[in-house]
Amino acid sequence: MSLFGKILEKLGLRKPENQSGAGADAASNEYSLPSPNPTPAPMEMPSAPSPIAVVDVVAQLEASAAKHPEKLNWKVSIVDLLKLLGLESSFGARKELALELGCPAEKMADSAQMNIWLHKTVLQKLAANGGNIPADLLD
């Protein structure tokens, strides 16, 4: 799973990936033969898209920060945000996340610029995936 996928999962914006399942079903159907007179499936009308459930990310992070032994400022620091989520916050992990999210090369060359870009982009992507991120953190 991608690092950003782990962030989404930790915040409840994505369900954990199923480790079993599809492979077993595919294997059991691997040798089935088609029926000689297949019945066409009835036409289904497309359903309206379901709205994205909004997750109170701020409340979750504030609650975690209050319990955390370190004083972490997740609102301005990507390192603190990752620590608060219990994820690897090393330079290597942040660089991997920046590459995953498409950080521009000129920002990758300067770790401070990369961190600022990464923090802003992660918050924007959390909002795009149903997280309630305040507008002042998205600017």
Image (cartoon, grey):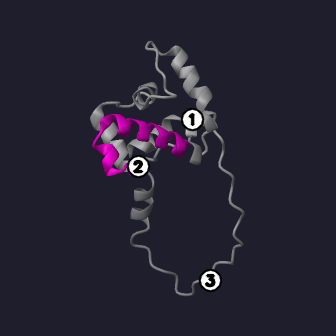
Number of the front mark, 2 or 1? 1
Q: Residue furthest bottom?
A: 37
Residue 86 seen anywhere in this rendered image of the structure: yes
Query: What SS does tag 2 mark?
Result: helix
Query: What SS does tag 1 mark?
Result: helix
Q: Which residue is mark 3?
A: 39
* Highlighted range, magenta: 102-126
Estimate the spatial distance between the alpha carbons at disc 2 and disc 3, rounded to whole Å: 45 Å
Residue 63 is one of the magenta-drawn residues: no
Q: Which residue is mark 1?
A: 137
Discs 3, 1 touching: Cβ within 8 Å: no
At a point 44% along the width and 12% down the height, the residue shown is 69
Q: Which secondary structure type mostly characterizes the magenta part of the structure? A: helix
Name the residue type under label 2: Leu
Please tell me which of labels 2 and 1 falls first in the chain.
Answer: 2
Number of the front mark, 3 or 1? 1
Side of 127 where 4 appears, left or right: left
Residue 80 is labelled as none
